[in-house]
Image (cartoon, rainbow, N blue to C red):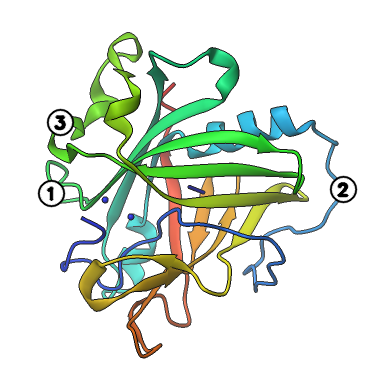
Amino acid sequence: MLTHRERSDTVRGGAGGFLGLALGISIGLGGWPLGGRAEPLTLSRQAEEVAERLMGVLDTAVQAASNPQVANVRMVTCQVSLADAPSSEGIWLYQEQAIATNLQAPYRQRFLHITPSPFSQTVRSLAYRPTRPNAWVNFCDRPAANRKIIRKDLGAAVCSVFLKRSGDVYMGVTPAIGCPTTARGAVRTTNRVILGADRMETWDRGYNAQGQQVWGAEGESYQFRRSSPSKE
């Protein structure tokens, strides 16, 4: 699960990001299997599985082709190494989103820390906004051995995402108060997320100080589909 300046004005309503998620989601899944029997996994393995599902390239090309109001957004995620942290600390990812026709100018960049959350029996994705975003553009294009960062590169922690496994998908939703933002007139954002093996759906919305929605998903989710294998 788990927004870069936060969102470009060229993206109508943004295009799904990983914001703080709490549990207790009830969503129309559009045919996704939900609540079926799945092999029990330890929380550590679930954290690995979430990271695996995030890594690689997902885009909204299929949705954009059928709905001209949806931008074709490309989301790229890869594993990175935090040089001054022990390997037992969890999994670190870099993620960026950009309009497919302008990949050199991502509108959202984040470092994600993926860890088990034993208290809530979920997987936590804690997002950081990089302090030097220009330094990380197309970072996932580098060989894995060269994708190393240190703690001061992480920037400010933005929001946590808590993902609960249900059947063969992970689901979550932001708390009622949402997460703080300054993107395009919004002061807070809310989101619902479903993460599958090869696709992700998000209902990402921004609200102003008066509680009015100023951008984001309306009736239809943003529908990302995998377009390339994981970038480890």
Residue 108, horizontal then vertical, whole percent:
27, 50
Q: Nearer the viewer, residue 97 or 150?
A: 150
Quadrant in the rendering for residue 155: top left
The residue type indicated by label 1 comes to Asn
- Determine which residue is flagged by label 2: 37
In the displayed structure, 92 sits above or below 129; it is above
In the displayed structure, 122 sits above or below 79; it is below
Quadrant in the rendering for residue 93: top left
Tag shown at residue 135: 3
The structure residue drawn at horizontal position 44% and vertical position 64%, both measured from the top left corner, is 179
The residue type indicated by label 2 comes to Arg
Q: Nearer the viewer, mark 3 or mark 2?
A: 3
Tag shown at residue 22: none
Q: Nearer the viewer, residue 62 or 101?
A: 101
Residue 169, horizontal then vertical, whole percent:
68, 50
How crowded pointer 2 is (Cα within 10 Å; few <14, some 14-19, many 20+) is rated as few
Q: Secondary structure at mark 1?
A: loop
N-terminal-most mark, 3 or 2: 2
The structure residue drawn at horizontal position 28% and vertical position 12%, both measured from the top left corner, is 146
Q: Which quadrant, please, contains the C terminus? A: top left
Task: Please indicate whether residue 28 sits to the left or right of residue 93 in the image.
Answer: right
Q: Secondary structure at mark 2?
A: loop
The structure residue drawn at horizontal position 37% and vertical position 89%, both measured from the top left corner, is 212
Q: Secondary structure at mark 3?
A: helix
- Determine which residue is flagged by label 1: 102
